[in-house]
Amino acid sequence: MRFVVSHTTFISLALILFSLWLLFRLWPVILVVVVALFILGTLSPIVLWLEARRIRRGFGIAIVFTGVITLVSLAVMLTVPSMVAQGAALFEREPAFRAALADHLAHYHLSAPFADWLRTFSYNTPGNRVGATAFAYSLRIFQVAAYGLSALFLALYMMIDRDRLRGGLFAVIPRRHHIRLTRVMLNLETIVGAYIRGQLITCFLIGAFTFVLLTACGVENALALAVFAAAADILPYIGAVLSIAPAGLAAIGHSPTAGAIVILAMLAYQEFESRLLIPKIYGRTLRLPSSVVFFALMAGWALMGLLGALLALPVAATIMMLIEELRVDLPGEQEQAADTILRARDDLEEAEYERRTAGVAAEQAAAIAVEISVDRRNQDLYPEHSP
């Protein structure tokens, strides 16, 4: 038997390999673009809201980005110096805190070996490279900050040139797909905006709760621990659990009673967040069941680590949205009467779009497609107001 590989197959394979290599090499740039799209999807509804109040688009963009930069600068100035000072104090008090924790653990038979390990632990051992690790993380933080600023300014340019960029996209895609493409873009904007707003709400709430709790219990360095809890809570479900350990250990170092109160209170808050907050904030807008949320987080962490966990929920919501918008027939699902109605509405909208955009430039056609899709979404959200 002879296997003959055609020139077309060989060229296609070469292009796929080249694309994968290019994707690997340009991964930081692609990540900046993805973050810029997240920022764009989060801030665009605010700009549209200002436009609806008769504020010019350029002035509205300036107001939004100035407000965001001002809030971020104020947050950094108010929290970072105190957090760094408290972090340094925590590091200086670490030997005494470790000794006190080892003394508490030594009273119990099961935790006695761990207490001995804490007493003999040394930062100067050959396998321990705390200094080098801290330096590497400081460089990483600087790199992340630079990428974040790049993404912010890229989002600004994309928002300013929205019509031109959208017109260019519509110019290269066949016109019969414009309505569906517009619906997908609007849904992506909704998903991204809901995800970022949910992140801000949950992170702020657990940070404020941790700060108030630790301050009430008299635990030192409450601000640094609260900021860590807010940063860890970026990961839904998992982050709340990660934030318990440092706060609980710091409280135990203050007093066993304070440690028990902090651990129990944060466990109760974690239960409140996982059962009420996250399903209410993410589940309603992203339309993801709790089981899908948890599975998506585990899959994202396994595939890409922390970055994969951060992107897991919007990616899962996007996949489910694409299945719905592209009218993909799943293997175990039978066509319902509602599916027939949806396809009929799709055909009517596409026919209307073809009629209204005959001989129209790509930018104007994109604006018409957005108008038709927004009307469709408003009819779905508010059926009582539809004609």
Image (cartoon, helix red, strand yellow):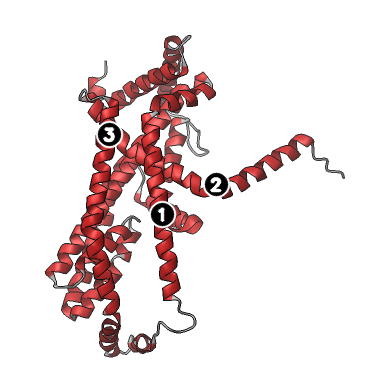
Residue extending furthest toward the left: 216
Compared to residue 290, the image places residue 57 above or below, namely above
Q: Amino acid at mark 2?
A: Leu
Q: Which mark is residue 210?
A: none
Earlier sequence position, callout 1 versus callout 2? 2
Q: Residue at x 43, y 24 (%)?
A: 164
Q: Amino acid at mark 1?
A: Val
Q: How far, Cα to Cα, is label 1 from label 2?
A: 16 Å
Q: How far, Cα to Cα, is label 1 from label 3?
A: 24 Å
* Spot occupied by residue 240 in the image (x, y as percentages of width and height): 29, 61
Q: Looking at this view, is 373 or 88 the one in front?
A: 88
Report helix, strand or loop for mark 2.
loop
Q: How far, Cα to Cα, is label 2 from label 3?
A: 30 Å
Rate crowding at label 3 as few (under 14), some (14 to 19) or many (20 or more) other CA atoms within 10 Å. some
Q: Residue at x 78, y 36 (%)?
A: 7
- Residue assigned mark 2: 26
Residue 104 visible, this angle: yes
* Spot occupied by residue 379 in the image (x, y as percentages of width and height): 29, 23
Q: Amino acid at mark 3?
A: Ala
Rate crowding at label 1 as few (under 14), some (14 to 19) or many (20 or more) other CA atoms within 10 Å. few
- Residue assigned mark 1: 144
